Structure formats: structure tokens, C-alpha cells
Image (cartoon, grey):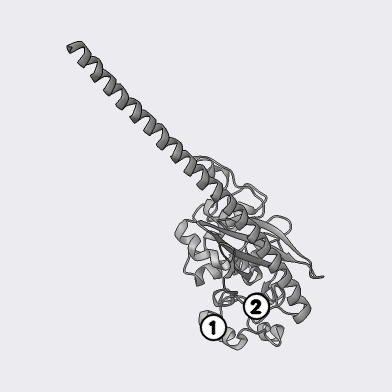
Amino acid sequence: MIAARRQRGVAVITAILLVAIATMIAVEMLWRSQLDQRRTAALIQSEQAWLYLRGAEALAGDILRQDLLEFGPDSDHLGEIWAQRLDPLPVEGGYVAGALEDLQGRFNLNNLINMSGQADPVAVEWFQRLLRVLELDPELVGYIVDWIDIDTQPSFPTGAEDGVYMSREPPYRPPNLPITSVSELLAIEGIDADTYAVLRPFVAALPQGTAVNVNTASAELLGSLDDALGISSALQLIEQRGDQDFPDFTGTFSTLVDENILPRLDERSSYFRLTARAAIGSTQLTMYSVLYREPNGVVRPLLRSLGTE
């Protein structure tokens, strides 16, 4: 009888173990099934959001073409249709939102070097004035010039070439090529996250030789055009401009800036940036797209990035 009781006890324990194991397997299978469903749903939502973002990019191109036809090629300003922020557009499962901004209303970092790959003195002095307006160290310009110029000799008194960057962990070399994204500044000696956050809204990475559109430039950028200007004078210029253009921008600025700066100003733009956001279910995507509008109105995307500028 004792042996029989022991056998029954073993059988009960075995049954309990089998039930526990079966329960664990069932729970694991259910969890994996739910996880696979979530992954599939997230993938579908991500693809759907990406398609909506591409649609927003196509819409932005249409807006820029329409702007050229409606307002003509002579001037671009903040009163035009491309500069109007659109409310979020409801779509199936979420919304899409976007805004265009004129990249030629910023200082083009690649203008710091000339077509020969050497530092451009006029642009360097202009950028130093901008840094002072932003209460940043004007000597930072030397590090940026060394990042994009063609030689490997550090600028004086401040500069950094291979010797500085190869001592970092991990080591890397400056490209000695034009900047393709403003975020490259974070890799440059002397520029930390706080400095980058202050500088980022006022600079762009465009092809060399692009002019600044005075109709869309900020007070900080206008105030850096000449030592005699400043934020107070720039704010007066912006009040005079409003959301339209300067009736005679050449006449307005010829008495305010040096003769070497005037040819670098314009009232037309060809480079714009679209910031588009799509939220579908629990998935959110942000796309930054640099758009180039040709003189005939054709708009081409030059650079796209997801999540980072």
C-alpha cells in the first residue's frame, strides 16, 4: 500500500509538472504570436507612414512650382504660399504634417571656402560676426574651415586637422570636402551639443556660391552683415520687410553693408527644406528633405534623412 501511495504521488507530481510545462509553452506561444502581430503591424504602419511622407514631399514640390508660376521668379518671401504652415492633415490611422523653410535664409557653411578649396576671407569675417551676434566664440570658424578646406594644415590661431581627430576614440579624419549635412558640426573640434543647438537654426549646408535671401533671413543673420549693424537695426529691417520683400533690396543694403557683401545677397531662393511628420497608429516618422527648385520650376529632392537633420 505504501508503494501504491508513492506511485500515486509521483503520478500526481508528474501530472502537475506536465500541466505547468504545457501552460508555459502555451503562454510562450501566445506571447510570440502577439509579438509577431505587433511587429507586423509596426512594419505595415512604418511603410504606410513612409508613403505618406513621400506624398508630402511631392505636394511640397507642387507648392514650390505653383509659387514660381503665381509669384514669378524675381523674388521669394515669407508671404508666399510655400511659407504658410499647414495644419495636420488627417489620414487613415493618423495624420501628416509638414512645413517648408528657405535654406537660403541661412548662412551657407560651404561658402567659407572658395572654389579653389581655400578659406574665403569675406565669408570668414561674416561668419565670425554671426558667431558674435549669437554670443559664440568667433574663433570656431577656424575649425570649420579646416574641416572643409583642401589642405591638411591647421588654421592659425585656431584650427584642427588630422593630428587632433586621429587622437580621438575612435579616431577619424576630417573629410576636407564640403559639408553635406549641418549635423557634421557635431564632429568638429570646439563644437559641443550646446554650441550646435545655438548655431543650427542659422546655418545650412548648400552648394558653394549660394546667396543669402534677405527676404527670409533672420534678424541674427541680417545683423551680422556688417559691424555697424546689429540686432536692433536688423529688427528694424525686418519690421520694414514684414512678410513681403524689400521693394529695392539693392538700394536698401548698398548703404548698410560692405561692397564685398552686397553681391552675396539676393531676394530669390532655389533651396528649401521640407520637415514632414507622419503618425500612423503608434508609429511616428519625421523626414527632412532638401529640395532644389530649378529655374523652370522642376523640383528635385537632393537629400533625405529620417529622424535627424
> Which residue occupies 59% across, 77% down?
222
Residue where numbered disc 2 is placed: 214
> Which residue occupies 64% across, 79% down?
78
Counting from the top left corner in percent of width and height, residue 121 is at 64, 64
> Is residue 155 something one can see in this rendering?
no
* Number of numbered discs visible in the structure rendering: 2
Quadrant in which residue 4 is drawn: top left
Crowding near the residue tagged with mark 2, few <14, some 14–19, many ≥20 C-alpha atoms within 10 Å: many
**Foreground pick, 242 / 54:** 54
In the picture, the quarter occupied by the C terminus is bottom right
- Tell me which numbered mark, 2 or 1, is placed earlier along the sequence: 2
Q: In the structure shown, which secondary structural element does the residue marked by tag 2 occupy?
A: loop
Counting from the top left corner in percent of width and height, residue 158 is at 53, 55
Gap in angstroms between the C-alphas marked 2 and 1: 13 Å
**Foreground pick, 66 / 308:** 66
Q: Is residue 22 above or below residue 222?
A: above
Say whether residue 2 is left or right of residue 147. left
> Which residue occupies 55% across, 56% down?
307
> Is residue 270 something one can see in this rendering?
yes
In the picture, the quarter occupied by the N terminus is top left
**Foreground pick, 145 / 23:** 23
Q: Is residue 24 above or below residue 307?
A: above
Say whether residue 39 is left or right of residue 208. left
Quadrant in which residue 87 is drawn: bottom right
